[in-house]
Amino acid sequence: MVRKIILAILGIALVFGAVRVAKKMIADKQAPKPREQKIITSVFTETVANSSTPITIKTSGNLKAKFRIELYAEVQGVFENTGRSFLPGEQYGKGATLIKINSEEHRANIRSQKSNLYNQIVNLLPDLKLDYDDSFESWEAYAKAFDMNEPLADFPEPLNEREQMFIAGKNILTNYYNIKNLEERLTKYTIKAPFYGILTEALIDRGAVVRAGQKLGSFISPSVYELEVGVNDAYTDLLQVGKKVNLQNTDHTKSWTGTVSRINGQVNPASQTIQVFIKVSGKDLREGMYLEAEVTAKEEKDTYEVNRKLLFDEDKLYVLRDTVLEVVQVNPVYFKENTVVVKGLADGEKILSRPVPGAYAGMKVSLFEAGNE
């Protein structure tokens, strides 16, 4: 009986052990690895066709009138009515009176000085008659023609050095030049337009007292303007005085053709740019307008223009050869806003037209021609 019980227990233990061994063997059995599926990326390409690419320089700036004067008073007095309104936007022809300052006090001073000079000349005549009879007639004629209200005429030329010293000793020359100085200053009381133009700034009203040195306004010619732009120092050797420049407004609805008129010889140390002045004239131009300038500096032969995003490591591009990507080194000639002009690509070579994430040399790809999406 005991023997049967022992055998039964051993049998159960063997069955239990066999089950555990079988489960372990099943758990340890490795499942077959799935086959990797190779994914081939489709790429877009374009065919290289080298040509001459124009190298353009783009910049911008504000217009300024080429002919401009700032109006300042050199004398003191009351601002008088000229018959025209002294207001911004008022147009004046060449020679028209811009500003007139009351000069009555100054004119009275000139007449007083002229009266003294006339008396000196009259008192001089008897001495001339006695000592310098040959010069008497010319001085007598000068005294008879003397006019208080006209500009002072030139003195008669002395016939010899003795006469010249005699006239100078009478202090007549000193008074003569004092009056000439006063007459010259009299012209400062009236400011005339040196050219046809427009008053752009008016800082004084009629009846106001004007002080010497006071700014009165600004006057410009609307016929010719200059656009001051900053050009990178690396490109200034491509510019020359007289070169044509295409100009546009910010909306690109109007365009003008300008000419490089001046190039500054100094480089701005902060921006490393050089001032270039472009002369332009035409309809619808106004001082202060913001214009964009595009200068065609030169043409680079045997070049091709590609998207800047395709360039990596500064001078490398991917090309497609037999469904495999390869790296070629190029020479970037000129960088534009979104593209770059390069040299070193062969005609007919296929390059990527769109960036491929994760691209590498030797990568196998399938061709998808650009434009056939």
Image: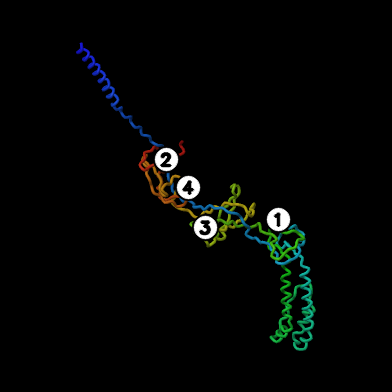
Disc 3 packing (10 Å; few <14; some 14–19; many ≥20): few
Residue 310's x, y, as percent? 44, 45
Residue at 43% in and 46% down: 311
| Label 1: element kind | loop
Disc 4 packing (10 Å; few <14; some 14–19; many ≥20): some
Relative horizontal placement of residue 5, taking residue 59 as reference (left or right): left
Q: Which residue is mark 2?
A: 357
Pick whichever of labels 4 and 2 is earlier in the sequence: 4
In this rendered view, identify the residue nearer to me: 215 or 41: 215
Relative horizontal placement of residue 202, taking residue 319 as reference (left or right): right
Foreground label between 4 and 1: 1
Write down the quadrant of residue 202 in the picture: bottom right
Residue at 72% in and 70% down: 185
Residue 105 vertical position relative to residue 116 in the rendered view, above or below: above
Q: Quadrant of the image for the N terminus?
A: top left
Q: Which residue is mark 4?
A: 339
| Label 3: element kind | loop
Write down the quadrant of residue 196 in the picture: bottom right
Q: Which residue is mark 3?
A: 270
Give the CA separation, mark 4 to mark 2.
19 Å
> Is the Cβ of the residue at disc 4 closer than 8 Å to that at disc 1?
no
Give the CA separation, mark 4 to mark 1.
46 Å
Foreground label between 3 and 1: 3
Return the residue found at the far left. Answer: 3
